[in-house]
Amino acid sequence: MEGISIAKLLAIAALIVLLFGTNKLRSLGGDLGAAIKGFKKAINDDQSVKTTTAGDDERLPVKFVITRTNRLNEKGRPVGLPFAISTSATESMCN
């Protein structure tokens, strides 16, 4: 049990190329590269948003609104939670 040698890896790679073909592998590699590029771009955009909003001194307070819901199923039994929570940031709270 010496592990996987270079010859075994080359044989596996040759089998994969024979099974899928070079066009399919090329498109798969392109899709994977585009996904990684998009992920990196999203991470960089997220970090730039965090750095620009971190220095904001003007913040609006968040108001939690709890409302009672009476959702019933066809048998008349309650469905889900008996309340709903929503948030809103309003400028009227600042005054």
Image (spheres, helix red, strand yellow):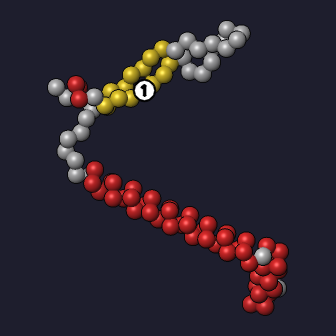
Up-down: is 78 above or below 7? above
Residue occupying the point 78% across, 76% down? 21
Name the residue type under label 1: Ser
Q: Which residue is at the far bottom?
A: 7
Would you say 8 lies left or right of 46 here? right
Counting from the top left corner in percent of width and height, residue 52 is at: 27, 54
- Look at the picture and state if 76 lies above or below 36: above
Decide if residue 71 is on the left or right side of residue 62: right
Instruction: Give the residue at x 50% y 19%.
Output: 83
- Indicate the quadrant where residue 14 lies: bottom right
Q: Is residue 58 above or below residue 47?
A: above
Q: Is residue 69 left or right of residue 23?
A: left
Q: Is residue 38 toward the left or the right of residue 47 in the image? A: right
In the picture as drawn, the residue positioned furthest to the left comes out as 95
Q: Would you name the residue on which mark 1 appears?
A: 86
Q: Residue at x 78, y 79 (%)?
A: 17
Q: Quadrant of the C terminus?
A: top left
Residue 52's place in the image compared with 31, above or below, is above
Q: Position of residue 68 (x, y in %)?
A: 48, 14
Sort mark 1 into few (<14), some (14-19) or many (20+) by Cα contacts within 10 Å.
Answer: few
Tell me if residue 22 can be seen. Answer: yes
- The quarter of the rendered structure image containing the N terminus is bottom right
Rendered location of residue 87, percent (x, y): 38, 29
* Residue 12 visible from this viewpoint: no
